[in-house]
Amino acid sequence: MLSSPLVIENLTLGYERHPAVHHLSVHIAPGSLVAVTGPNGAGKSTLLKCLAGLMKPMEGRIECPVQQAVAYMPQTSQIDRSFPINVFDMVAMGLWREIGALGRLSAGQRQRCQEALATVGLAEFGHRTLDTLSGGQLQRALFARLMLQDASLLLLDEPFAAVDERTTGELVDVMHRWRREGRTVIAVLHDLDLVRRHFEQVLLLARELVAWGRPDQVLVPDQLARARNMHEAFDDNAPLCEPSPARHGMSEGALKL
């Protein structure tokens, strides 16, 4: 598990020199359950991709004590459901670090895969192909794969999109179990009621940091309105700029971990 904070310092991210996230600085304590929220196009998914090591910062740094123990779940829209693989084999990919590209599953590893499927209610779905699953069933399978990765830092991009209330509740329980095990969970979410009920900290993002702290401090009308206004005013063609105290500082009343 993470033994020291995940440090994000003056982080600027973008595509073809067009910034998507500007001068973000936060420290996330080990074992935290963190929601990242904000308007569409606010840089939330971009932030997770960078934390997962899928893109490099334009400026700034990320300091993670165990980079090799990071698990990333992309949005389901990025998953090719026509790929000819069954649910069991897709879930077993969570053991990649143990078995490598050419390794074979041992009896014990196959049992762990089956137990992960059972935990998310898919014990009888191992033989099914991905294109036969509903949205909720696919999300359950992706959670099972994450379980097998045994990561200290878990990054989930819209894990409850197109998922019914029952499935959401069961998968939220899985996240709480990860948190009790000392894992750090960072999830991109749009459902603010869900964030208020289940998350300890919220990062409100609108290309820049709007607020960072507890849900009751961050998800308030003036902060949410500020996030919308900041995002609408953002110039996609703006050049990179120097960080300012306002960008580095927390908004009034927010918690710095």
Image (cartoon, grey):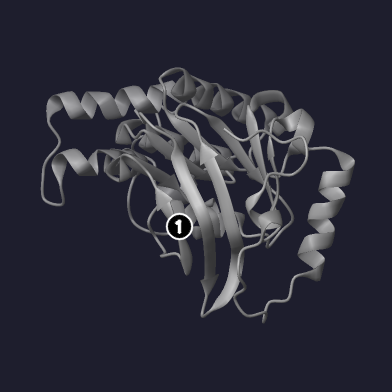
Residue 110 is left or right of residue 160, and the answer is left
Residue 42 visible at all: yes
User: Mark 1 Cα within 10 Å, few/some/many (few <14, many 20+)?
Assistant: some
Front-most of residues 102 and 249: 249
The answer to whether residue 185 is above or below residue 129 is above
Front-most of residues 133 and 209: 209
Residue 21, percent across and down? 60, 62
Residue 134 visible at all: no
> Quarter-wise, where is residue 238 in the image?
bottom right
Mark 1 element type = helix
The answer to whether residue 63 is above or below residue 176 is below
Q: Residue at x 63, y 27 (%)?
A: 200
Q: Residue at x 55, y 21 (%)?
A: 173
Residue 79, percent across and down? 46, 56
Residue 146 is left or right of residue 39, and the answer is left
Quarter of the figure with the N terminus: top left
- Going by the numbered disc 1, the residue's amino acid type is Cys
Residue 213 is left or right of residue 153, and the answer is right
> Quarter-wise, where is residue 98 in the image?
top left
Residue ID for mark 1: 50
Residue 73, percent across and down? 45, 46
Q: Residue at x 52, y 40 (%)?
A: 27
The answer to whether residue 14 is above or below residue 163 is below
The answer to whether residue 240 is above or below residue 184 is below
Q: Residue at x 75, y 70 (%)?
A: 234
Quarter of the figure with the C terminus: top right
Front-most of residues 60 and 228: 60
Front-most of residues 62 and 15: 62
Number of numbered markers: 1
> Quarter-wise, where is residue 123 in the image?
top left
Residue 227, percent across and down? 79, 54
